[in-house]
Amino acid sequence: MSDTEGADTGTDGGTSSGAGAPTRLHQLFEGRRLTPTQRRIAHCLVRRTAAAPFLSSVELAQLAGVSQPSVTRFAVALGFDGYPALRRHLRDVVPVGPAVDTRPANPYQQAVRAEVDNLLQLASLLADPGPVEDAARLLAASRPLPVLGLRASAAQARGFAYFAAKVHPDVRLLDEGGSLLADRIDAARRAGASALLCFALPRHPAELLAALDHARNAGLTVVTIADGTFAPVAAHSDLLLPAAVGTGLVFDTVSAPMLLGQVLLEAMCDGMPDAQARLEEFDARAAARGLFVD
């Protein structure tokens, strides 16, 4: 089964790789304008990092749900003579890791294990905290701070905006599309905004790309949390932070992007001298109002 809103045909297995391997795979796809079919192949390789160097083109095509010629075209799009050359490259950049878990598992367990693998992949990417810290500085300095997320990404944008508002003086949630979206971006820019945070998870609405282009043309620096550096929004963002989504269930699972949002917010708090004071003020107000029962 697949859902037209949140699901993308994916693989059912997880990855098991050495530290740094996901980073090198993402670097292989960075800056590439991949077709939707090619992005599915890239997702499959990232999620099956340990097995990727040993898959035949036919096996990879079956796992990604595409044709064998599509795998060949994918390798050529990455600059290789063909799939064998790509596979040799993968054997050079992907270290041999622990054996893949072969214990019997039902589909629900497989989905959970795949999500755990996504979190481990995120941990590997965060070995270099530079991109997150750079993004945090940009967002913390923006007054106001617009946070954008449409359709399947609206929940992540709303959750981030809720917590960010406790430490940032002016957070503006943009979770509805339509003709007013550009107006709201312009209003934030006129009010002094210098950066915009976007959550962009599959599937990616066409109007989201237009909104990001509008924001950049208006002078905003766009920071995007997306499902990979090969996502369609990569070319429309100034700084992209990747976090894989799970595709083993009818609807995508987004534990890694949600956690990355919280990591980003943590980094923002580290760079905001008044963050702790704002949290204490909120707690005092909440206690005076009897807002919480615990």
Image: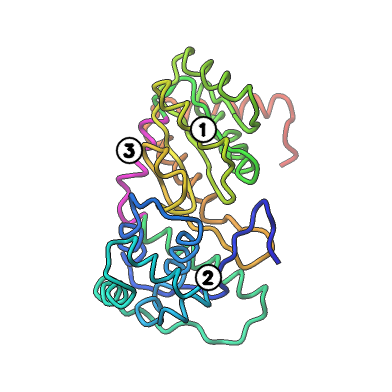
Front-lying residue, 48 or 121 = 48
Residue linked to disc 3: 134
Label count reads 3
* Residue ranking furthest to the top: 190
Q: Secondary structure at mark 1?
A: helix
Q: Amino acid at mark 2?
A: Val
Asked if residue 2 lies left or right of residue 131, the reply is: right
Say few, some or many: other residues with alpha carbon within 10 Å of mark 2 (under 14 / 14 to 19 / 20 or more). some
- For the C terminus, give its image quadrant: top right
Tag nearer the camera, 2 or 3: 2
> What distance separates the C-alpha of mark 1 from that of mark 3?
24 Å
Q: Where is residue 74, by image quadrant?
A: bottom left
- Residue 172 percent across, percent down from the top left: 57, 25
Asked if residue 148 lies left or right of residue 230, the reply is: right
Front-lying residue, 72 or 252 = 72
- The segment highlighted magenta reads 126-139
Q: Residue at x 32, y 65 (%)?
A: 76
- Residue 154 percent across, percent down from the top left: 63, 40
- Residue 71 percent across, percent down from the top left: 42, 70
Q: Amino acid at mark 1?
A: Ala
Q: Amino acid at mark 3?
A: Asp
Q: Secondary structure at mark 2?
A: loop
Residue 131 falls inside the magenta stretch? yes
Q: Secondary structure at mark 3?
A: helix
Residue linked to disc 1: 210
* Residue ranking furthest to the left: 92
Q: Residue at x 63, y 22 (%)?
A: 180
Q: Specify the label residue 66 is tagged with.
A: 2
Say few, some or many: other residues with alpha carbon within 10 Å of mark 3 (under 14 / 14 to 19 / 20 or more). some
